[in-house]
Amino acid sequence: MTTPTPRNLDWLLDDLVARMPDVRFAIVLSTDGMLLGRCTSMEQADAERFGAMASTLHGVARSAGAHFDVGGVCQTVVELDEAVLFITAAGENACLALLTVETANMGMVAYEMNQTVQRVGAHLSVDPRPTLDEAGSRQP
C-alpha cells in the first residue's frame, strides 16, 4: 500500500509530535490513502491503516461539500471517547493527519497543523495517479 517517494517527510512528523505532547501519531497521506510519511513512533502497518481511515473520512467530508455545493474541506475532525483525529488538506492531493489525546487543545492542534502545512506545503503535494481510459490505456 505504500509508494516510494523521493522526499522523506518523517522528520517533519517527528518534529510535530515532539513539539506537541498531546499528539500521539502523525502521518502524511495522498488523498487516495497512500502513505507518504509517518512519525517514527508509529509502526508502518498501523500508519498505512491510519492513512486508509483518514483518506476515507476526508473523502466523505469532500463529498458532503460537493453535494451541498458549499466548497472544499479545510479540516476534518473526529472526536472519539479517548482521542481526537484531525485531518487537514496539505497541498495538492495530500493530507496531514494527527491523532491526539482527548484533552488536547483542539485550537492549538489545528493551528500547528496549518502552520506546518504552510511551511512545507509544496513538499506535501502529490501528483494525481494516472487513470485508465475506456481502452485500458493510462491517462494522466
Image (spheres, rainbow, N blue to C red):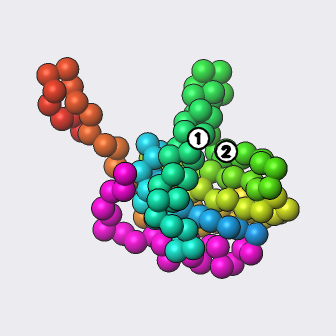
Q: Is residue 91 above or below residue 113?
A: above
The residue at which mark 1 appears reads as 58
Is residue 128 located in the magenta-colored stretch of the structure?
Answer: no
The residue at which mark 2 appears reads as 76
Name the residue: 56% across, 45% down. Answer: 53
User: Label 1, label 2: how many angstroms apart (C-alpha)?
Assistant: 6 Å
SS at badge 2: strand
Q: Amino acid at mark 2?
A: Thr
Name the residue: 26% across, 39% down. Answer: 130
Whether residue 107 is visible here, answered yes or no, is: no
> Horizontal placement of 15 versus 77: left or right?
left
Q: Which mark is residue 50?
A: none
| Magenta segment | 1-21
Quadrant for the C terminus, please.
top left
Q: How far from the left and from the top, in percent, is residue 79?
A: 78, 47
Q: Is residue 82 above or below residue 71?
A: below
Whether label 1 touches label 2, CB < 8 Å: yes
Name the residue: 20% across, 20% down. Answer: 134
Whether residue 66 is visible here, answered yes or no, is: yes
Name the residue: 30% across, 62% down. Answer: 4
